[in-house]
Image: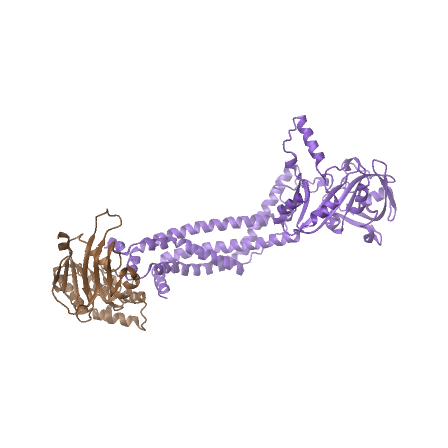
Chain colours: A brown, B purple
Amino acid sequence: MMANKKKENSPKNILLSIQNASYRYSDAVADDYALKDISFDFESGKIYAIRGRSGSGKTTLLSLISGLEKCSEGEIIFDGKSLKDMNLDKYRNSDIGIVFQSYNLLPFMTAAENIILSMDANGLKIKNKKEKAIELMEKVGLKDGFADRKVLRLSGGEQQRVAIARSLSYNPKMIIADEPTGNLDKQTESEILDIFQKLAHEENKCVIIVTHSQNVCDSADVVFDLKKVKEK
Amino acid sequence: MFIFKNAWISIKRNKGRNILIGIIILIIACACTITLAIKNTAVDLIQSYKSAYDKEVTIGFNRENMMKDFDPSQEEGRTNARERFDNIASYTISDVEKFADSKYIDSYYYTYGVGLNGNNIEKAEIESNNDMPNGFGHGKGNNFSTTDFTLTGYSSLDAMSEFINGTYTMNEITDNAWDVAFDGNYVFINQELADYNELHLNDKIQLKDDDGNTYEFEIIGIFKENEEEGQTMSMFSNSANALVTNANAVNSIVSGNENLKGDLYPTFIIDSYDHVEKLQDEFYEKGLDENFVLQSNEELALSGVSSIQNINSFATTFLILTLIIGGVVLFVINMINIRERKYEIGVLRTIGISKLKLTMQFVSELAMVAVVALILGAGIGAVSSKGISNSLLANEINSSNERVEEIGKNFGNDGGMPNRGDRGEMRGKGMPVVQAYDSIDAVVDIKVLVELLGIGLSLVLVSSIASMVSIQRFSPLTILKERS
C-alpha cells in the first residue's frame, strides 16, 4: 500500500486501524479478492482521501470501515476495540457518521426530520431535537428556512449538507464519506470540503473520504491510493 | 418509542395502502366476530341441550361382528351365523351390577321383559300380529311374538321411560301402589286390556308359561297410552297387552324356569360420551361377550340441535376460509409494501437502526392499523351477528322442513313424514327432526373479543413474515447501490 502523507501529527492519535484486512464476496472464486491485505491507520483531526479506479475496492473498503460488511481476513480496530466484537448498529449510530454520494435522505421527510430520525436512532435524549437539527444545519451552511422543506425540494448541494448535518447529529468521532462531492459543481464542492476541513481540524474528527476528485485529494491531509496498491 | 413514532409517521405517509389494509382487516374482523359469536353461542346451546339429556349407554348387538363371514347363499354360512347367535353368552342382573361398578357410570337401571300367556285373562283383540310395546322385540332369545302378553319389569322409577316421557299415563292407581310396585307380584295394566277383561284395581290376574307354570299378579294401576297427534282412530294401542311390573318379579319367573328366556335391557348413565369406548373395553374385561357393543344416545341428544350444528359447522368453515384468504391477501400486500420501501430500509439500516427495531416498526405499523380495524370490525360484527345468525338458522330450518316435505311426498303423504305405527315417526340417516331452537342469540362477549384479538395478532404476525424475512436478508449497501 502507498500513502501520501501531507501532514504529521505527533504524538499519533490513532482512531481507526485497518490490520491486514482482506475482503472477498461470498460468491467470488477462491483467490478473487476485492481487497487484499490492507493495513492503514486513521488518526483523529485529519482528513483522509481514498482514491482509486473503478473496481479498485474503494467502496468495499468504506463498507468495511463503516461496519456494513465484515472482513474476510484481518481486522479493523476502532478506538481500541475490534469491530468484530462491537455492535455494528450501535457503532454506526453513535461512533461514526456516513455521508453518501447520493445523499440517501428519506424523501418523504423534511430536512429537519431526517436529522431528528438519526438522533432518534442514536437514542439521543435532548429536549428540543428540532432546535438541535436547525443548529446543525446552520453549521453546514443551511439557513433556518430549510428545516421544514421536504428534501426533494432541496438542491443537490443542499441535500448533501443535510446529509452531513445528519451524520453530525450525535457527534460521532469519525465521518466516512463516499464520493460526497461527486454530484456537485466546483463551487459547492469547495464549500462542502470546507465543512470537512473544519470538522477535522477544528473539531478533531477523523474524516475519511472515498473520491475520484483531485480537489478532494488536494484538500486531504493523507491520500490513500488503492490504484497504486493494486498495481504494486 | 422511536419505533412507534416512526411507525405512525409511515402510516400517515402511506394513507392509501394503510386504508386498504384497514378495510381488509375490518372485513376479516367483522366476519370473524360474527362467526365466532355464532360458533360460541351454538356450542353453548348444543352443550346445554346435551346436558338436558342423561348421557345414556345401552348394550346392543354388534351386528357387524355377528355377520362376519356370513354368506346367506350358503347353507353352511347360515348355520354358522345361527350357531354363533345361539352361542352368544347373555348377561344377567348380577352381570349388569358388576358392569355398573365403574368410575364412568353415575347410575343405572334396567328393564326385564318376558313373554307369557293368560290363564284367567284374554289378550285384547287387536288387528296386528305385532303386539310388542316400544323398545321390545329386538333382543336375543325373546319369545314375545308367540305369547299373549309381555310382562315388563322395571328396576326403578328411572327405568320407566314410557311414563317419564308421557307415552303412558296412569288412569287409576291404588293408594299404596308406589310403595309396593318394585317388590312383589303387582302389575299395571292397560285400560284397553282392563276394559276387555272387565278388570279393576286390586283384581288378580294369572299368567302362565309354556310349561304350564302359573304366576299371579295383583293389579295396582291402570294406564293408558297417549296417541300421538295425527294418529287415526282406526289405529290400535301398541301397549294393550303390555303388563308392567318390577324387575325382581320377572327375574324370579325367569330364574325359576330354564326354558323361559327373558330380555334384560340395562341403561347406564355415564359421565361423558367421551368415555363410551373405555367403558366398553371395561365391560369386555368384566365378561361381556364381544358380540355386544355399547350404544350411546348422543345422536338422539343432538338431534334437536342439528340445524344449530350445521350453522356451527358453516361458521367454522367460513372462519377458516376468511382467515386463509385474508391472511394471503395481507401477506401479498405486505410483500409489495416491503419491495416499495426497500430504499427506506437501506437508509435506516445504514444510519444504524437494527434489524430487530426495523422489523418491530413494520409489525407495529400493521398492528396499529389492525387494532383500529379490529375495534371497528368487532363493533359492526356485534351489531349484525344476531340478525345474521337468526337469518342463517331460519334458512337452515326452512331447508330442513323442505326436506321433510319432499321425503313425505315420496311416501305419498303431503303432510310430511309418515308414521310407522309402533315404531313412531320415521327418523334416521338424513332425516330432519323437529328443532329444539328456532332462534340463536349470538352474543359478542369477552370470549369472542379475546379470540378476535388472538386472531388479529396472529394475522398481523403471519402477514408480517414477508417484512421480517426481507429485513433480515436485505443488505443496506446493495439496496443503496441499486438506488444510486
Query: For the image shown, how many numbered marks are present on the structure?
Result: 0
Residue A227 versus residue B438: which sits nearer the camera? A227
Q: Position of residue B206 (x, y in %)?
A: 86, 42
The residue sitting at 60% across, 54% down in the picture is: B45
B23 over B234 or under it: above or below: below
Residue B255 versus residue B245: which sits nearer the camera? B255
Report the side of B60 relative to B204 (left or right): left
Q: Which quadrant, please, contains the N terminus of chain A? A: bottom left
Q: Position of residue B18 (x, y in %)?
A: 38, 58
Q: Position of residue B362 (x, y in %)?
A: 36, 58
| Quarter occupied by residue A52 | bottom left
Mark yes or no: residue B243 visible: no
Residue B46 versus residue A97: which sits nearer the camera? A97
Report the side of B351 relative to B197 (left or right): left
B128 over A45 or under it: above or below: above
Residue B243 versus residue B322: which sits nearer the camera? B243
Q: Position of residue B159 (x, y in %)?
A: 74, 49
B124 over B34 or under it: above or below: above
Which residue, as the protein is rendered here, is positioned at the far bottom? Answer: A127
Mark yes or no: residue B373 visible: yes
Report the side of B175 relative to B481 (left or right): right
